[in-house]
Amino acid sequence: MADTNIAFYAQFIASKAGKNGIAVTWDVERITRSTGARSALVTGGATNITVGRRGLYGYLLTTADLILYDYVATAITADATVDQQEVAAVWTKWGMAVWDEPLTAATHNIATSSGRRVRQLSDVVIIDGIIGAGSTANTLILNGGASAVDGAYDPALVYISSGTGVGQCRNILEYEGAARRCWVDRDWKVTPAAGDEYVILADAGREHVNEGHAQSGGLNWIQLNPIASANDDAYIGQVVFIRSGTGQDQARRITDYIGATRTALVYPNWDTIPDATSTGAILPTAVMTDDQIGNAVWAHTPRTLTMSLTTLKSIMTGSKLILWRGDTLSLPMLNLGSLVGATNLWFTVKKHPADTDATAQIQISLLNGLQAIDGAPATVPANGSIVITNAVTGNITVNLAAVETAKLDVDFTGYYDVQLLMGATVTTLTHGCCSVVGDTTRRIV
């Protein structure tokens, strides 16, 4: 093992007592172990270790290599009062040489040795340091010496080794390099404070498809982190789980995914809407979709329906609507809640929820009739209507003329909702997926 520092010590005695306060110089020889050759390494070196008692003097050699060489030192003084003016020195490894020496496989690789075991333990430490200011319930701000590269420490484990939050350990789901911010998988029991110490350890993470902090959220959607997939439908059928922050401990199935905006639509609605403080993970699942369940039920023999398919769909909040192109639409929707005193009511179908109302595939208003059809403003408002059939229970019928449904694109898929305006309060009464299928008989073309 190569040590960088060796300390030599010698004692000068006068009349059987240590002699302090004299000038002492040092000569050091280096002896090559392989050949026995000797060479003067230091001549007349000044004392540089202060002992100050019992006639002890010291010299620190900072260029030692105990693999290749041995060392001999002599302490010399011109003071005539001492019993001996040249004294052979003893030496020891200087403490800094042991604890500050770099641990490498080249110099610390002897099986079962302490050096090798310490090196192997330290290999899993990615970085440690002092925590900066600004940590929150589910984030940790690292010191300025941490990486400025996004993702540098995810996935990994962070452990609070001292200070206010000592003893806590969390998975890092996402790391923002510019802010030195770690987003962790669970809220801290005690939020770490500036000046606490942390250690980040290598960890392969869990079986997530995607993880990180959300950008925003809504009643039935969440905008994932920027590194989520840019491909439409990438996460359909999988589960998004809010692990920490606002809305934590909720899990929802993803019904649609818009890659361009990293937006996942979920079912059912969130109880607590996630926001930019939420962290989550996309969990791979093999759940059956609505279409798969519906097709399996329809294929079963025998099957018995006690009401029309349209009525059945309309009373299932969040169900999928199937509209026939070219057919006259008369769609009952039941038990939406009290509509007594309704200011206005809308039935809307869109490709993406973010599309404007003017470009909706269908938008019908209680007060104004048909407002949009096939992505453009409607020209005949009377061709669409919403009729409240029972205001107390919230039963309505949505009507649309065949001449208007004939304008819809076959194989269209998107989303619908029914929205209520009561005074100044807006409420979404129901929502779900919607598709348009082609009619076989083309009575209206």
Image: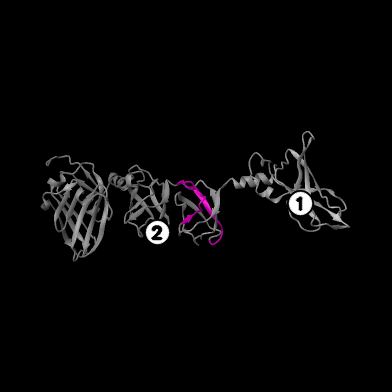
What kind of residue is marked 2? Thr
* SS at circle 2: loop
**Range drawn in magenta:** 139-164
Q: Is disc 1 placed on a helix, strand or loop?
A: strand
At which x and y percent is residue 412? Answer: 23, 43
Q: 194 above or below 290?
A: below
Q: Quadrant of the N terminus?
A: top right
Mark 1 vs mark 2: which is more N-terminal?
Answer: 1
Q: Residue 246 bears which disc, if any? A: 2
Q: Position of residue 196 (x, y in %)?
A: 54, 58
Q: Is 89 one of the magenta-colored residues?
A: no
Q: Main secondary structure of the magenta part?
A: loop
Report whether 328 appears left or right of 26: left
Looking at the image, which residue is at 38% across and 52% down? Answer: 214
Crowd around label 1: few <14 · some 14–19 · many ≥20 (10 Å): many
State yes or no: residue 146 in magenta: yes
Please tell me in which quadrant of the rendered image residue 368 appears: bottom left
User: In the depicted view, which residue is nearer to us: 110 or 85?
Assistant: 85
Residue 55 seen from this side: yes
Q: Dot 1 corresponds to which residue?
A: 58
CA gap between label 1 and label 2 equals 63 Å
Residue neighbourhood size for the residue with mark 2, other residues' Cα within 10 Å, grouped as few (<14), some (14–19), many (≥20): some
Give residue 130's position: percent from left, percent from top: 54, 55
User: Which color scheme did the rendering employ for the protein?
Assistant: one colour
